[in-house]
Amino acid sequence: MKLFSRPKIPTSTILEIDGQPVVVQVRTNARARNYRLSIPHSGGPVLTLPPHGRWADAEAFLRRQTNWLAARLPRAAAPVSFLPGAIIPLRGRDHLIAASGKTRGRVELLEEGDALTLMVPGDPAHQARRLTDWLKQEAEIDLKRQTMVHAANLGVTVRALRLRSQSTRWGSCSSAGNLNFNWRLILAPDYVLDYVAAHEVAHLVEMNHSAAFWATVSKTLPDMERGRTWLKANGRQLMAYGI
């Protein structure tokens, strides 16, 4: 009979910061070696424990990170749902989401002077999904076009292109020639989507981030720093849309 048992690790805990309760999600990761606190692009802070971590040690670690978390929480992007009345970017330009009043049909772009509106059809309960599906279609069109441009420039072949909804990645490339992209790139300015397309196509030449890799990106997209810089500055907010 065991006299003592290890405290059960909760799925979440609350940390008080500046007098306000902050919910911290708690996870155990089989590959983690240490306790780690992070703020994903979407959602609140996450405390990660190694497989054999103890909750008492995890709590102590979390308390030591209070100042770190307090300094970074204001930077976390607030979620933006695709509901009528919300304003979202499309290719870098702000658009108002509005219900079209139609039961069927496609999302329509309405431009009146400087005002840009996305008219979304369907039942209110399904409008967010309809808009998301339409944005994914637009992203696929743009990404296919730009990856073909960069593949031709670098003399490589893209075997497949797929869209994903990763919360931390904008793209990935497999050795088989398959490219994955985050559909939220359609929200960014065109040159940002173009940069990520060039970045992933360049991995078909160099499967690393060496100097040779960056030279390959620059070869097909000389102005790559423009998109790269924008994404570093604004990527976290972009990830918050549609959640």
Image (spheres, helix red, strand yellow):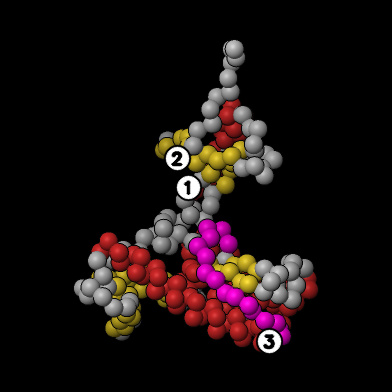
The crowding category of the residue bearing disc 3, from other C-alpha atoms within 10 Å (few below 14, some 14 to 19, many at least 20), is some
Please provide the residue range marked out in magenta. 153-169
Which structural element holds mark 3? Answer: helix
Which structural element holds mark 2? Answer: strand
First of labels 3, 2 by sequence position: 2
Write down the residue under mark 3.
153
Q: In front of the other: label 3 or label 1?
A: 3
Write down the residue under mark 1.
44
223 in relation to 173, above or below:
below
Q: In front of the other: label 3 or label 2?
A: 3
The crowding category of the residue bearing disc 1, from other C-alpha atoms within 10 Å (few below 14, some 14 to 19, many at least 20), is some
54 in relation to 207, above or below:
above
First of labels 1, 2 by sequence position: 2
First of labels 3, 1 by sequence position: 1
Between residue 86 and residue 185, name the one nearer to us: 185
Residue 148 picture location, percent across and down: 60, 84
Q: Amino acid at mark 3?
A: Asn
Residue drawn at (26%, 75%), measured in percent from left and top? 104
Write down the residue under mark 2.
22
Residue drawn at (61%, 38%), measured in percent from left and top? 49
Image mark count: 3
Asked if the magenta segment contains residue 92, the reply would be: no
Q: Is residue 111 left or right of residue 29?
A: left
Which structural element holds mark 1? Answer: loop
